[in-house]
Image (cartoon, rainbow, N blue to C red):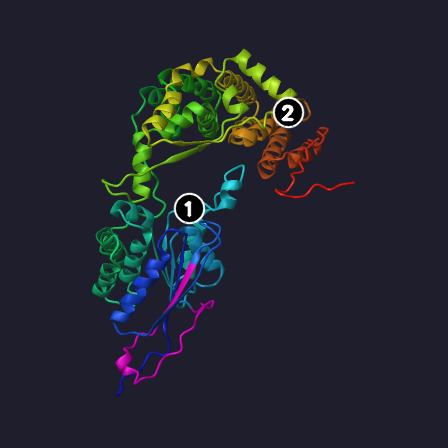
């Protein structure tokens, strides 16, 4: 009999958005087990996502917070799908998924506790952009503060990694610690134990997240900047303004790691020329330092082989798959070297001969070999490492000479423009953003860079420095928006530069396997 006990008017609704492989289904099972331990009626449904990152798998759980014994054999009617404005606890395993939930009105200031990790796993559309296509995380953090009744936000992926577990355990701990669910901590921990897999790491991740969500642990301020912890350079400290030290130190460490100390000294020599003509707030020096470091550290086969065979990489992979010390982990490298990659390692005359021969026969994009190499085997590791050992010979390669010549041309243009217009010099420096990628992507990017350099930077199409800076900015943004270059040609046409004709693309007709030949 219910007596004077007043039954809840509605169930508690929970919506979980998790990516593939993060254990969202296990999290839903834990919630159901913990609710069942309290003898609460509970129901769960799931909608699978499209892929690992193009769509999240959502789990919807409704918990009626009254023991079955008090219901007198009555059963609450629980829904199968969430309704906007009707979610009590919204859980997101990644920041953009939290933003997606807010956009779909699943988070309301009157009702919803938002629990989300602040780390990012970049969506396909973000990584496809030629420029910085990342969504502004600060917008989501600000929206969470105004749209949710309460927001519990911290880097749960980091806690999961440190605990040696998956993020679902940390999410579960944050949910329990937030107090938004009528579930005792002991019941939640027992649900994890009954799961029977990875119990101890999951309990560890649960506990540390519980402390963060309940306020027992000190949370790091959101948006706290990473402090550079590498070895300081005396030359940077004495020769460059303090405002630029952090950026230059990061670039210096990257360049030294890419080649050697002499290459790092060349990096500083080049920056010194820019700093001497930078009479503003030193943004010109900082942006040049950023893109100069990235450009000087272009990726070739030598660099790729070096990075893939480092101890830190193997340790990171083992941590990502949560491998135990006695468990073997096999890593297979998928490589497809072609004419560009091979010629990049050859001396200038040989490289030009190979590239010319391939272009005349239209084989540049056809001569490549797919290689599957197990870098965790002795043979595979030694093959990869032998390529990395070619690093001292990099200065003798055709690619090195080509890149250094173009870098010097870019830096000369920046230094020449700075005395007359820092704005123009800065726009020329920002052209370094166009240089990126490899293969077809790199060829298109460099072609767009050279097109702007030839016409707007070194050409006389626009004489006024302010107008030229605006034209370069518009051309750069057009090139980043359209890697094929048609938007760039349209931008150049607006300032009186004749556009280049579209590049012809060959059409290939492929016969279906087993298709019968047509007879006349």
Callout 1 secondary element: loop
Q: Residue furthest top?
A: 349
Q: Find residue 342 and report its horizontal and vertical position in percent.
A: 50, 21
Q: Residue furthest right?
A: 520
Q: Quadrant of the C terminus?
A: top right
Q: Quadrant of residue 250?
A: top left
Q: Which residue is mark 2?
A: 362
Q: Nearer the viewer, residue 281 or 48?
A: 48
Q: Quadrant of residue 322?
A: top left
Q: Give whichever of discs 1 and 2 has the lower sequence position.
A: 1
Report, in whole angstroms, how far the alpha carbon at label 1 lies from the one at label 2. 39 Å
Callout 2 secondary element: loop
User: In the image, is 285 to the left or to the right of 412?
Assistant: left
Please tell me which residue is depicted at 45% across the width and 68% down the height of the picture: 81
Tell me where the magenta segment starts and ends, as one range.
58-86
Q: Find residue 310 and report its horizontal and vertical position in percent.
A: 33, 29
Dot label at residue 121:
1
Q: Quadrant of the N terminus?
A: bottom left
């Amino acid at each position: 009999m219910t007596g004077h006990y007043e039954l809840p008017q509605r169930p508690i609704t929970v919506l979980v958005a998790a990516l593939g492989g993060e254990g969202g289904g296990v999290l839903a099972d834990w919630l159901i087990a913990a609710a069942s331990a309290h003898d609460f009626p509970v129901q769960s449904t799931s909608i699978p996502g499209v892929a690992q990152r193009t769509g999240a798998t959502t789990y919807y759980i409704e918990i009626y917070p009254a023991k079955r014994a008090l219901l007198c054999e009555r059963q609450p009617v629980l829904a199968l799908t969430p309704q906007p404005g009707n979610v009590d606890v919204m859980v997101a395993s990644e920041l953009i998924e939290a933003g997606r939930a807010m956009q779909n009105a699943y988070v309301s200031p009157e009702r919803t506790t938002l629990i989300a990790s602040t780390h990012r796993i970049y969506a396909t559309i973000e990584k496809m952009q030629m420029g910085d296509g990342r969504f502004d995380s600060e917008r989501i953090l600000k929206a969470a503060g105004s749209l949710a009744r309460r927001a519990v936000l911290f880097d749960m992926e980091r806690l999961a990694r440190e605990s040696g577990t998956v993020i679902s355990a940390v999410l579960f701990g944050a949910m329990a610690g937030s107090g938004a669910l009528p579930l005792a901590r002991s019941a939640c921990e027992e649900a994890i134990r009954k799961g029977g897999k990875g119990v101890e790491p999951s309990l560890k991740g649960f506990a540390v997240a519980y402390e963060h969500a309940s306020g027992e642990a000190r949370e790091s301020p959101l948006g706290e900047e990473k402090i550079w912890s590498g070895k300081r350079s005396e030359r940077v400290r004495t020769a460059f303004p303090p405002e630029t030290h952090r950026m230059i130190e990061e670039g210096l460490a990257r360049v030294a790691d890419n080649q050697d100390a002499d290459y790092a000294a060349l990096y500083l020599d080049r920056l010194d020329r820019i700093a001497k003509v930078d009479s503003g707030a030193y943004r010109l020096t900082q942006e040049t330092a950023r893109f100069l470091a990235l450009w000087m550290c272009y990726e070739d086969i030598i660099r790729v082989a070096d990075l893939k065979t480092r101890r830190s990489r193997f340790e990171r992979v083992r941590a990502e798959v949560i491998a135990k010390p006695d468990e073997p982990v096999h890593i297979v490298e998928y490589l497809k070297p072609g004419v560009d990659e091979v010629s990049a390692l050859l001396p200038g005359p040989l490289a030009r001969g190979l590239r010319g021969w391939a272009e005349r026969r239209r084989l540049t994009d056809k001569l490549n070999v797919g290689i599957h190499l197990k870098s965790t085997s002795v043979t595979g590791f030694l093959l990869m490492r032998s390529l990395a050992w070619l690093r001292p010979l990099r200065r003798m390669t055709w690619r090195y000479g080509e890149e250094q010549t173009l870098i010097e041309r870019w830096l000369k243009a920046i230094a020449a423009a700075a005395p007359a217009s820092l704005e123009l010099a800065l726009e020329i420096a920002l052209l370094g953003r166009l240089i990126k990628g490899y293969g077809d992507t790199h060829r298109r990017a460099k072609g767009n860079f050279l097109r702007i350099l030839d016409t707007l930077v070194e050409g006389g199409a626009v004489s006024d420095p302010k107008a030229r800076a605006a034209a370069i900015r518009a051309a750069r943004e057009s090139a980043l928006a359209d890697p094929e270059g048609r938007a760039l040609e349209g931008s150049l046409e607006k300032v009186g530069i004749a556009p280049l004709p579209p590049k012809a693309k060959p059409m290939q007709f492929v016969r279906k396997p087993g298709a019968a030949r047509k007879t006349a």
